[in-house]
Image (spheres, grey):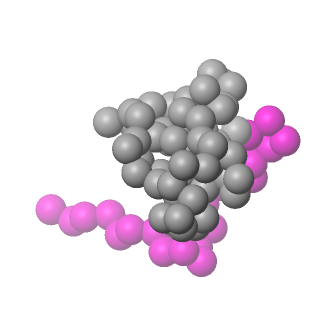
Amino acid sequence: MKRARKQSAGEYDPTWRPPTGDTVHLVRVQPGERTCLKCGDTFAAGGYCIHCGEENAGSPSVATADYLQPEEYVTVR
């Protein structure tokens, strides 16, 4: 039995099409994930923004799922 050779990165693929203007990549959100309102970084629920530092542990944050529009994200487990 002969196996088909995997296509390498530089080879022509007739099925490939470039992304169009309506191509949307969804943001993957973990359950309970938070977004820091100071810098925009994300962190786990119950944690703190490591970008802003532990001294700013009380800085305002919001649930990432509430921060994004419903069509902009998908929840992963």
Q: Horizontal placement of 36 versus 31: left or right?
A: right
- Could you tell me how many numbered marks the image carries? 0
Q: Outermost residue, top direction?
A: 70
Task: Indicate the position of residue 40 as horizontal and vertical percent values.
Answer: 67, 52
Front residue of 22/51: it is 51
**Residue at position x 25%, y 64% in the image:** 3
Q: Is residue 15 visible from the viewing direction of this image?
A: no
Magenta span: predominant SS is loop
Question: Is 68 above or below relative to 8?
Answer: above
Q: Magenta segment, which residues?
A: 1-23
Q: Horizontal placement of 59 versus 29: left or right?
A: right
Task: Indicate the position of residue 75 as horizontal and vertical percent values.
Answer: 45, 31
Task: Indicate the position of residue 9 as horizontal and vertical percent values.
Answer: 54, 74
Residue 21 part of the magenta-drawn span: yes
Front residue of 15/38: it is 38
Q: Looking at the figure, which quarter contains the N terminus?
A: bottom left
Question: Is 74 above or below relative to 34?
Answer: above
**Residue at position x 46%, y 69% in the image:** 7
Front residue of 24/69: it is 69
Residue 12 picture quarter: bottom right
